[in-house]
Amino acid sequence: MKFDIKLNGNKYLVEIDNFSAKILKKTNESFETLDIDNKEYAYVPDFDFTEEENSTSIIKATLPGTVIEIDVSVGTKVKKGEKLMVLESMKMENVLTAPHDCLIEEILVSIGSYVTKEQDLVAIMSN
């Protein structure tokens, strides 16, 4: 696959064998953007989570989409950065990873579920 990419005003022709993309940088209150084949993508974090009492956190969806993969189960201990699940949104896969070492307390969605922005996905407890 070949793409014409414009990043921070510079143009590149990139050939990719296996396509997966993530925009990695947010500056101040503005979003970094990436143009791929004349389509603009904005930075989107992998997930959002909020702390609750007794060190339980809830990972929430940052975009609407469909759950296409769940890689953990209740009671699983995971390390920071380990893959939890994959959401598909606008034909792109968004891999959700653990924000820190934790224990999976509850999985609030199932494979095939359509989720809305800010919907609770997984309850985790800090290790």
Image (cartoon, rainbow, N blue to C red):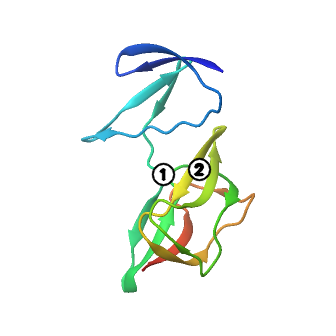
What is the x, y in percent for residue 79? 48, 68
Q: Residue at x 62, y 71 (%)?
A: 108
Comparing 67 with 10, the one in front is 10
The quadrant in which residue 48 appears is bottom left
Q: How many marks?
A: 2
Left or right of residue 126: residue 114: right
Name the mark on residue 78.
Answer: none
What is the x, y in percent for residue 28? 24, 41
State which mark lies toward you, 2 or 1: 1
Image quadrant holding the N terminus, namely top right
Comparing 6 with 51, the one in front is 6
Left or right of residue 82: residue 43: left
Image quadrant holding the C terminus, namely bottom left
Q: Earlier in the sequence, mark 2 or mark 1?
A: 1
Q: Residue at x 59, y 37 (%)?
A: 20
Q: Amino acid at mark 2?
A: Pro
Q: Residue at x 52, y 74 (%)?
A: 123
Taking 123 as reference, is 60 above or below it? above
Secondary element at tag 2 = loop
Q: Residue at x 35, y 22 (%)?
A: 8
Distance in Å between CA atoms under marks 2 and 1: 12 Å
Taking 92 as reference, is 120 above or below it? below
Name the mark on residue 64.
Answer: 2
Left or right of residue 88: residue 11: left
The quadrant in which residue 104 appears is bottom right
Residue that mark 1 sits on: 46
Q: Residues within 10 Å of mark 1 (few under 14, many from 20)?
A: many
Comparing 17 with 126, the one in front is 17
Q: Residues within 10 Å of mark 2 (few under 14, many from 20)?
A: some
What is the x, y in percent for residue 106? 59, 78
Q: Residue furthest right?
A: 112
Taking 102 as reference, is 13 above or below it? above
